[in-house]
Amino acid sequence: MPAPKTDVMLRNWELLKLIPLKPPGKTAGQLRDELERIGYAVHKKTVERDMVSLSTILPIMVNDDTKPFYWYWMPNASLNLPGVALTEALSLVLAEQTLTGVMHKSLLAPLKGRLDAAKRLLGEAKGQNSKAAWADKICAVPRDLVLRAPKVNEAILDSVQDALVADRQIDIEYRSLMDAAPSWRTVNPRALLLKGSVMYLLADKKGVVETSKDEPVRQYALHRIRSTRASLKPVVRREFNLTNYRRTEEHEVGSRHGVRVRLRITSDLAKILRETPLAPKQRIKVSGDNIVVEAAVRNTPALRRWILGHGSAVEVIGPAVLRAAIRTKILAAAAKY
């Protein structure tokens, strides 16, 4: 077990990083506990004195209407804190370029202080350090058309995140694409899933209504949630693991069972698939001008979108059900032209 850390300046540096970016904030007791977990043994009174002292020179707010007091950073505070390394600054700026327009802006808000510091550092370092100009020599662009992220009510996002963190049920007024009108339902939040530019709440209603079947985890698009009501009821326990959920690709609606697809492809597409395979055990067979790729995948909308997106460069040989589905889509599209 490492010896407790005692350096006051380093302790206060870690303390600043533990202060929440928005209300309700954290108490001195909570901050003391978090400091202790990273090796700084300190009394709550000491943390209280440090917070009072730091708030006189930094944009730190305190809610003193209730006891214990809650501390948090002032909204939109630009945290001019040192310690952002040049390489980290480059990574942050490039990450912002990549994620802006894809992720909801509220997800990038917690990084605002560090992003501002990173941009200042890069600006000051230009002309003095050749690495600082790297951000001007690289950019990230999507390979395909990317739909803009739908608008999500920030209050709704906050309430959903609060329910997830607290492991409490939440009432949501939701309207799916198939619904004529929104309706209320009580759900057990399990996780958030960002799929492309759309964020989904993964939740189930197990234990809310009496059913003989296990309620499946469903996807609720956050931008389709009209309003929420907080609940004090804890979530009903169930076996759910986000890593397993993602590994089994249940986020893609479709058959859970794998199928072996056989596709006749062009030589240009074959070059691409040799570099970026469809599946780990993909096989490409070449016989003259006839090139066939075989791979075990799941029959999901993502697979069908990929096939249709390559147009005449792909012909489905098997399975027959997939070939029929693609044929129907192509004929329907051709009929419109």
Image (cartoon, rainbow, N blue to C red):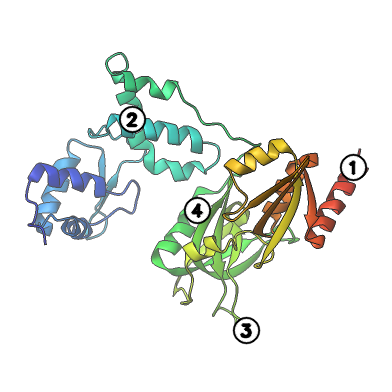
Mark nearest the camera among 3 and 1 is 1
Residue 147 visible in this rendered orientation of the protein: no
Q: Which residue is mark 3?
A: 211
Which residue does the image show at 46% across and 54% down from the upper left? 158
Q: Quadrant of the C terminus?
A: top right
Which residue occupies the foreground of this view, 166 or 10?
10
Tell me the amino acid under the disc marked 2: Ala
Q: Which residue is mark 1?
A: 334
Q: Is residue 90 left or right of residue 214?
A: left
- Give the mark nearest the N terminus, 1 or 2: 2
Position of residue 248 relative to residue 276, above or below, is below
Mark nearest the camera among 2 and 3 is 2
Are the residues tagged 2 and 3 within 8 Å (C-beta)? Answer: no
Tell me the amino acid under the disc marked 3: Thr
In space, the residues marked 1 and 4 are separated at their CA atoms by: 41 Å
Q: Which residue is mark 4?
A: 157
Tell me the amino acid under the disc marked 1: Ala
Q: Is residue 325 left or right of residue 283?
A: right
- Give the mark nearest the N terminus, 2 or 3: 2
